[in-house]
Amino acid sequence: MSNAQSIRVSDTRDLVAANLTAELRRKRYSDRQAATALGLTNVYVSRRASGAVELSATDLVMFSEFLQIPITKLFEGMKKGPETSASGPVPLPDVDSNHEPAG
């Protein structure tokens, strides 16, 4: 993974974690209260809410259902990447298993 890709992943993880924390606080939950209500450890919730651990798809669903918010709320503020445009998805080039141009 290139440095630019790792920065992007880190930024996304931090953004989602910040949105999760904001929603927990908006609903007046501490990490400990959320953990107890979800049957998880405080460390599990805290590490995800801080961005120390990336949220899995299962985590995203669990927290969005617990907070009664759409999953997309956790991604608010994310910029569109180069693979999208105002007119829709940009087709990606065909590549082989080595990520080299196919053909």
Image (spheres, rainbow, N blue to C red):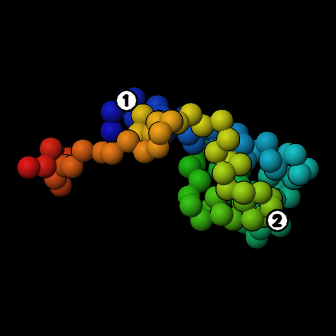
Residue 73 appearing in the image: yes
User: In the displayed image of the protein, which residue is found farthest to the bottom?
Assistant: 39
**Image coords of residue 66 (percent x, y):** 78, 64
Q: Amino acid at mark 2?
A: Thr
Residue 14 location, quadrant: top right
Q: Residue at x 47, y 43 (%)?
A: 88
- Secondary structure under badge 1? helix
> Residue 36, labelled with which disc?
2
Pick out the residue farthest to the right.
28
Residue 7, horizontal then vertical, whole percent: 46, 31
Residue extending farthest front: 87
Residue 41 shows in this picture: no
Q: Give the residue at x 67% y 41%.
A: 76
The answer to whether 97 appears left or right of 34 in the picture is left
Instruction: Give the residue at mark 1.
Output: 3
Q: Which mark, residue 34?
A: none
Is 11 rendered above or below residue 51? above
Q: Amino acid at mark 1?
A: Asn
Question: 10 Å neighbourhood of mark 1: few (<14), some, or many (≥20)?
Answer: few
On the rendered image, what quadrant is the N terminus found in? top left
Up-down relation of residue 60 to residue 74 (above or below): below
- From this view, report whether residue 7 is shown above or below residue 96: above
* Residue 11 percent across, percent down from the top left: 55, 34
Give the residue displayed 56% in from the left and 58% down from the top.
Answer: 56
